Image (cartoon, rainbow, N blue to C red):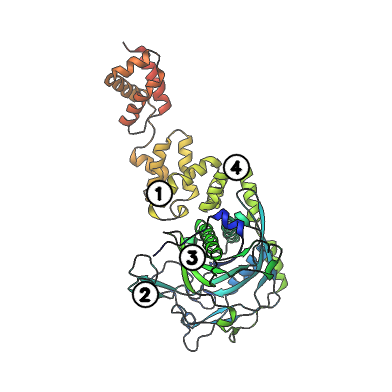
């Protein structure tokens, strides 16, 4: 496939104003699905979390999940939205293999939440207010697993399998209004907005928010309009594309940047943009055409006849409003100030989704920089190797137990890395692993002196340099002692003994 032609990003911004709109789908972590008693569990065997409603079997009727309603209201309030006194459900009609009913129950004319705004903060400190048009409830579709081929997509696959486990999982779709004025920050605004939504739903406790699992998915709409129309608002907008289901913060930023550069090249060459969905390819960093973008009329919405209108009591709304957590932007500012991290250090934690994990670790008593070192260092390395989120491998309490042994002088950093690996592999507690593996630091002078004398005897030239005042040469002896004792020696005490023994050597 020929490589897509792109315009330089800065040149694209000289000629066009980028306008974006974001649709974020948040899967709710209720125990059961939106309209049935089927379990809402990730990772089960295919087609096991099912009930007749999920498949649209004859005679089955949907029953609304009240916990999903509470979660949706909480999210709407956190987005600064008005909560509708009356909202309703509609049938969104289209055929797709992973929708057993051939329609999706969603909200159309009457969403549960509308007209809000979310404040986000960019790495530069710039504050952006993202306007929210609506947040509506709906059920998720199932999932197609494409077998064969190299990309995991339908193109090139030998066949496809349908898994209906996800069909009916409760969703809230958050739709922004067009976001103007982003300019060069537009890609970062998209990423920072989704990151803020992720932090919100985690703080609310309404979603597992695992982007790699599809708990949060973003559709990014991008359009360009020629310079000179900046004050025209929505009266002059370019044709948009919608890049579907981008599932990482980095990819969202890259996909928006790519579409700006791709569309700018086409428009500058006299071409036109096709209104369509597009697929993001992580391996190449490009988007490719999907299907022509449907408008609302194409879905033939009509009121869902099997569900009554939803009329949440005002007392419930105010009760949920009183329970709202600290806003993510304010929380980030507070934590960064308390922890005294640099902008880059803090942004790395945000991008890695480790903010809450670090916060839990610090709350146990681990110093912020120490917690950051372990979670973004050795633990992240193992997590990357195993393609597993760090928080699934080890708990903040377990990390704190390792740090406690380091602070007590029982372990050094090298030995602590081995203990962390042992905890992750299920070998036991930190103390049990230290004892079983014999990892405690050796600080007994008798054993250390014996090792130091042996190393000095093996390297007389280094001994001579140390005695001549070249103290830095002691590093070679220290290294030899640490190697001989398999990293379990107290390095500071070894250095003291090397200098003492060298000075007294005959």
- Camera-near label (1 vs 3) is 3
From what the image shows, is residue 11 above or below residue 504?
below
Q: Earlier in the sequence, mark 3 or mark 4?
A: 3
Residue 433 in the figure: left or right of residue 204:
left
Which residue position is annotated with label 1?
382
Q: Earlier in the sequence, mark 2 or mark 3?
A: 2
Secondary structure at badge 2 equals strand
Residue 474 falls in which quadrant of the image? top left
Residue 360, x across and y down, in percent: 55, 49
Q: Earlier in the sequence, mark 2 or mark 4?
A: 2
Which residue position is annotated with label 3?
214
- Extreme residue in the left direction: 458
For residue 181, the mark is: none
Residue toward you, 199 or 244: 244
Residue 413, x across and y down, in percent: 43, 37
From what the image shows, is residue 489 above or below residue 164?
above
> Within 10 angstroms of label 3, few (less than 14), some, or many (20 or more) residues?
some
Which residue position is annotated with label 2?
160
Could you tell me which quadrant the N terminus lies in?
bottom left
Q: Distance between the Cα atoms at labels 1 and 3?
A: 22 Å
Q: Are marks 3 and 4 in contact (CB under 8 Å)?
A: no
Residue 407, x across and y down, in percent: 48, 35
Q: Are marks 2 and 4 in contact (CB under 8 Å)?
A: no
> Within 10 angstroms of label 1, few (less than 14), some, or many (20 or more) residues?
some
Secondary structure at badge 3 equals loop
Secondary structure at badge 4 equals helix
In percent of the image, x 64 and y 68: which residue is there? Answer: 237
Q: Earlier in the sequence, mark 1 or mark 2?
A: 2
């Amino acid at each position: 496939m020929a490589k897509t032609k792109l315009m330089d990003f800065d040149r694209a911004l000289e000629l066009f104003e980028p306008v974006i709109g974001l649709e974020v789908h948040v899967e709710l972590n209720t125990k059961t699905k939106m309209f049935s008693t089927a379990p809402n569990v990730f990772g089960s065997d295919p087609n096991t979390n099912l009930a007749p409603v999920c498949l649209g079997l004859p005679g089955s009727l949907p029953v609304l999940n009240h916990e999903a309603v509470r979660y949706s209201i909480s999210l709407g309030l956190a987005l600064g939205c008005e909560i509708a006194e009356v909202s309703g459900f509609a049938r969104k009609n289209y055929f797709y293999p992973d929708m057993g009913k051939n329609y999706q129950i969603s909200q159309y004319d009457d969403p549960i939440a509308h007209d809000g705004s979310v404040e986000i903060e960019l790495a530069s400190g710039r504050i952006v207010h993202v306007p929210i048009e609506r947040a509506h409830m709906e059920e998720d579709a199932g999932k197609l697993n494409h077998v064969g081929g190299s990309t995991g997509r339908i193109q090139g696959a030998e066949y496809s399998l349908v898994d209906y486990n996800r069909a009916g999982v409760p969703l809230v779709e958050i739709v922004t209004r067009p976001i103007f004025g982003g300019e060069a920050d537009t890609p970062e605004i998209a990423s920072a907005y989704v990151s803020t939504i992720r932090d919100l739903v985690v703080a609310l406790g309404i979603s597992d928010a695992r982007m790699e699992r599809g708990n949060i998915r973003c559709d990014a709409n991008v359009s360009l309009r020629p310079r000179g129309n900046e004050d025209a608002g929505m009266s002059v907008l370019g044709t948009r594309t919608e890049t579907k289901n981008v599932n990482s913060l980095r990819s969202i930023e890259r996909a928006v940047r790519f579409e700006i550069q791709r569309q700018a090249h086409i428009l500058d060459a006299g071409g036109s943009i096709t209104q369509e969905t597009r697929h993001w390819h992580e391996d190449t960093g490009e988007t490719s055409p999907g299907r022509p973008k449907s408008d609302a009329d194409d879905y033939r919405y009509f009121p869902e006849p099997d569900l009554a209108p939803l009329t949440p009591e005002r007392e419930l709304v105010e009760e949920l409003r009183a329970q709202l957590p600290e806003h993510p932007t304010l929380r980030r500012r507070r934590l960064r100030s308390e922890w005294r991290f640099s902008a880059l250090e803090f942004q790395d934690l945000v991008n890695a989704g480790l903010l809450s994990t670090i916060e839990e670790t610090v709350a146990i008593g681990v110093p912020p920089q120490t917690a950051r070192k372990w979670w973004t260092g050795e633990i992240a390395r193992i997590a990357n190797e195993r393609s597993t989120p760090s928080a699934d491998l080890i708990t903040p309490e377990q990390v704190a137990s390792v740090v406690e042994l380091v602070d007590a002088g029982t372990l050094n950093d090298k030995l602590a890395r081995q203990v962390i690996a042992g905890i992750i592999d299920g070998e036991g507690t930190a103390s049990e692993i230290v004892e079983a593996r014999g990892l405690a630091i050796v600080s007994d002078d008798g054993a250390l002196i014996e090792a130091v004398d042996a190393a000095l005897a093996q390297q007389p030239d280094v001994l001579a340099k140390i005695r001549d005042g070249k103290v830095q040469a002691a590093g070679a002896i220290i290294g030899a002692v640490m190697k001989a004792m398999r990293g379990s020696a107290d390095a500071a005490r070894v250095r003291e003994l090397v200098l003492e023994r060298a000075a007294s050597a005959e």
